[in-house]
Image (spheres, rainbow, N blue to C red):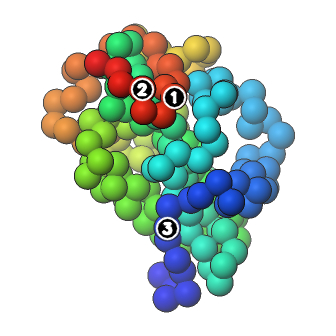
Amino acid sequence: MSPDINNRHLTPADLPFVSKLHAKVFGPGRFTRTAYRVREGTPPISPYCRGAFLAGRLIASVRFTEVAIGEHGDVLLLGPLAVDPQFANKGFGRALVGEALTDAKARGVCLVVLVGDEPYYARFGFKKVPFGQITLPGPVDPQRLLAAELVPGALAEYRGLITARTFGQSAG
Ligand SMILES: CC(C)(COP(=O)(O)OP(=O)(O)OC[C@H]1O[C@@H](n2cnc3c(N)ncnc32)[C@H](O)[C@@H]1OP(=O)(O)O)[C@@H](O)C(=O)NCCC(=O)NCCS
């Protein structure tokens, strides 16, 4: 990866550039996804979000939302992960997600969930959630509901609906 790349936490000031990148990568249909329903009303930039900057320009970003599953917190919902198509398959997605998971683990996050492609996310330790164990407020392909345990065995402790949490709220 080029030495001109700066991977760092995102701040609210980065939001316009994140929104622009999402529009470029996902198009207008992005707001209809079920994962967006969970994120509705949450701060768009949480302390876990990261971006990759090339000469100051945002070329990749990953967003995380603090959520609860049933009554239990210490969970993040990953997404969207977006890499500018011009820079795809150069390791930017892998670097961002890898660093973000290391950071989340250090901050005491137990579980990270997402809706995405297992063949891509398996490299980070994501695996399919057993059918029906965790639900979202809308339809999701169960083959694409994945979880990574940052604490070994954590997944077994989580059951129920994924809901957004407001910052600082303690759940279970
Ligand atoms: C999917 C995406 C995040 C990958 O990030 P990236 O920086 O381009 O990819 P990386 O460099 O981290 O990884 C590249 C590897 O992943 C593989 N890969 C990329 N997308 C994949 C997918 N959807 N399924 C399986 N493997 C995938 C590539 O073939 C490559 O494999 P290799 O290492 O064996 O050569 C990025 O291309 C992207 O933003 N795509 C459009 C939006 C999207 O689908 N986002 C994910 C859902 S939230």
What kind of element bears circle 3?
A: strand
Sequence-first tag of 3 and 1: 3
Query: How many angstroms separate mark 2 from mark 1 (CA)?
Result: 6 Å
Horizontally, residue 7 falls left or right of residue 105, namely right
What kind of element bears circle 2?
A: loop
Q: Are marks 2 and 1 in contact (CB under 8 Å)?
A: yes
Check the image and report above or below for 21 versus 55.
above
Horizontally, residue 131 falls left or right of residue 51, namely left
Check the image and report above or below for 19 versus 65.
below
Sequence-first tag of 3 and 2: 3
Residue 162, image x and y in percent?
47, 19
In which quadrant of the rendered view does residue 140 lie? top right
Which residue is located at x 83 percent, y 40 percent?
28
Q: Quadrant of the C terminus?
A: top left
Q: Which of the two residues, 128 or 55, is positioned nearer the viewer here? A: 55
The residue that label 1 is drawn on is 166
| Labels 3, 2: front one | 2
Which residue is located at x 60 percent, y 73 percent?
53
Amino acid under label 2? Gln
The residue that label 3 is drawn on is 8
Residue 2, image x and y in percent?
51, 86
Query: How many angstroms separate mark 3 from mark 2 (CA)?
Result: 25 Å
Check the image and report above or below for 107 versus 148.
below
Query: How many angstroms separate mark 3 from mark 1 (CA)?
Result: 23 Å
Q: Residues within 10 Å of mark 3 (few under 14, many from 20)?
A: some
Residue 92, image x and y in percent?
52, 68
The residue that label 2 is drawn on is 169
